[in-house]
Amino acid sequence: MYDCISIGSSLVDIFISSKDLEAKHKKGQEILTYGDKLDLSDFHIFTGGGASNTSVSLARLGYKVAVISETGQDEFSDLIIRDFEREGVATQLLIREKLERTGGSVLLVTKDGERIAMTYRGAASMLDPYDIPAFWLTQSRWVHLSSIAGQKNTLEKIFKCLIKDQDTKLSWNPGKGEINLLLKNTFNLEEIPCEVFFVNQQEWASLVPVQKSILVNFPQVIVTMGKKGGEVYMYGKKKFVFEGQASQAIDNTGAGDSFAAGYIAALIDNRESDEAIVWGVRNASSVVRFYGAKTGLLRRYQMLELLAAQKK
């Protein structure tokens, strides 16, 4: 049995940063400004993606984790698998398709840590219903679902598997494709066995037409607001607002995934939601201090030391 199975994308991220990169907001748009010549201050290649980030984070926090993602059979897939093996994430449920290419992103990181991402999802967008092993989902304490490019039939299979098994809890951090499906009322939310629903402030604002239904049907709804913190709704009512932790951000990539993983880890540890928030905030504030979505992920002893120091 696994403590958690993480379903979503596993990608390769190429980070390009420069002091000359600046994201400016103008009339609701982001404009990338640059000089005649753009010198790079840094260049990195990391593995990433929602399933990859959360599974590694949970493994570092001491849990038995497996990942369900789809990749190609190429050098990028080899890199991803080596990362999983080094971090102790089980790869037996990973799908490698010979005729597909592993997805990836090029991320332009501005001087203040903001990012502009250009993503090729490739195999990550091709997770089909037959790739989802119903038996293994029901043998896990938790299933964490992140973006699978709005694959409706695959989502339906995941939900149906977990409706039948009340012992496995589901946390869901939808991507753009899944949010579009929610806005189209594709699913009956009463039939989605979601225990914890994670979205950021912008995503929550886009879900206004279905917010009420989400709050009624999903016991815990967490709306994150970056450095400002976020809001926690429990059983349809706002329970509390939480603050973020002051941290010098180098790269915000993976902040949402690390927060979600920290929160879920605390719930697996049978802790209350207010303490789970602290786990999430601590994990995310560590991640944004480094390039890449995994470099700053806390290990269990680090998390416990930070929590102990906070109580003094």
Image: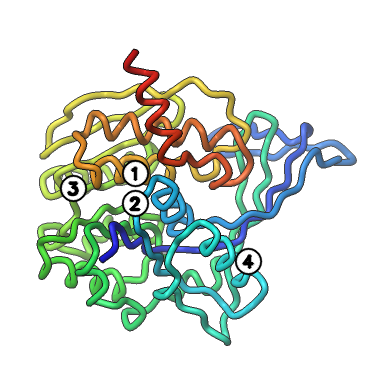
Viewer-side label of 2, 4: 4
Q: Classify mark 2: residues with Cα within 10 Å, few (<14), some (14-19) or many (20+).
A: many
Give whichever of discs 3 and 2 has the lower sequence position. 2
| Residue occupying the point 28% across, 69% down | 155
Q: Quadrant of residue 33?
A: top right
Percent position of residue 164, x then y = 10, 70
Report which residue position mark 4 lands on: 79
Report which residue position mark 2 lands on: 173
Residue farthest to the top, as pictured: 312
Give whichever of discs 2 and 1 has the lower sequence position. 2
Q: Quadrant of residue 122?
A: bottom right
Give the amino acid at mark 3: Ile
The vertical placement of 212 against 121, above or below, is: above
Give the amino acid at mark 1: Val
Give the amino acid at mark 4: Leu
Q: State the SS at label 4.
A: helix
| Residue occupying the point 31% across, 57% down | 144
Percent position of residue 208, x then y = 26, 42
Q: Classify mark 4: residues with Cα within 10 Å, few (<14), some (14-19) or many (20+).
A: some
Between marks 3 and 1, how big is the CA–CA gap?
11 Å
